[in-house]
Image (cartoon, rainbow, N blue to C red):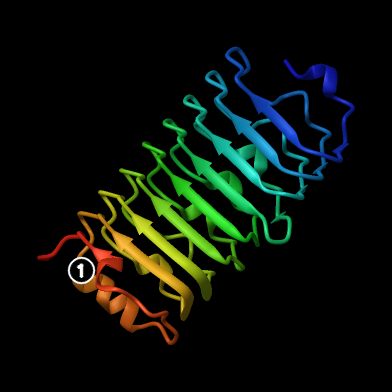
Amino acid sequence: TLSPLSELRSIDGHFLLGATSLLTSLEGLENLEEVGAEMQLILNEGLTSTDGLEQLRHIGDGLLVWENDALVSLEGLGRVEEIGANQSITIAGNDSLTSLDGLGGLRSAHHLTVQDNRSLTSLEGLSALESLSDLFIAYNPTITSLDGLSGIAELGVVVIEGNEALESLSGLSNLVAVIDSIYIQDNTALCESAIQAFVTGLSEVPEMEQEDICCNMAVC
């Protein structure tokens, strides 16, 4: 239990919770409103939710949620609107996580990585996101669409790789410009023709090599 921290309202530096086995939630942190630097939840094998963080509004220097095998929900993060200027969000290796609904208040971030979450079926929890520079969606075997990213109009980097159930890019329908690079590879249920239509529909496209779009479903 984290109840001895119940009076904590802010942390000036980093918040790291890692390598626990008995902790199932973050209850006890109900009064925490701000983390000044990076927040890391890593390798907590018994953690099933982020309940207890309902008052948290601001994270100053990035969010890392990594290898929490029992984690099914991020609902406790619902009031967070901003992850510091030029900072990143990484949600990776959480085998039981089924949705990103707990990130529904998030409006801006710099770099978003969603990778290796074996039970994640949707990105719809990101529907409030309006400002993002780099997008990495990789090796999430049960994601079928990118719905939830319709608020994004411009990106610097787009990497969509190894999502074997991904069938559509329609979730990026409001994206008009990609500045630096596009890599769409090894999504074996995603039609090459749909990818070409997506790229053609952009008003600004970076220089691309043939291998940047590769090894997706060739015949649809």
Along the line of sight, which residue is nearer the eye, 193 or 158?
A: 158
Query: Which quadrant: the N terminus?
Result: top right
**Residue 95 falls in image quadrant:** top left
Along the line of sight, which residue is nearer the eye, 211 or 88?
A: 211
> Percent from the top left, x then y, of residue 172?
42, 69
Along the line of sight, which residue is nearer the eye, 178 or 130?
A: 178
> Percent from the top left, x then y, of residue 184?
32, 63
Q: Which residue is mark 1?
A: 192
Q: Is residue 8 above or below residue 45?
A: below
- Furthest-bottom residue in this view: 203
Q: Residues within 10 Å of mark 1 (few under 14, many from 20)?
A: many
Q: Is residue 126 above or below residue 181?
A: above
> Percent from the top left, x then y, of residue 8?
87, 30
Tell me: 174 left or right of 188. Answer: right
Q: Is residue 124 visible?
A: yes
Disc 1 is placed on an element classified as helix
Q: Residue at x 68, y 27 (%)?
A: 17
Q: Residue at x 47, y 48 (%)?
A: 114
Query: Which quadrant: the C terminus?
Result: bottom left
- Furthest-left residue in this view: 219
**Residue 141 falls in image quadrant:** top left
Q: Is residue 45 above or below residue 173?
A: above
> Percent from the top left, x then y, of residue 72?
49, 32
Q: Amino acid at mark 1?
A: Glu
Q: Is residue 40 above or below residue 23?
A: below
Q: Residue at x 72, y 43 (%)?
A: 38
Number of numbered markers: 1
Q: Is residue 105 visible?
A: no
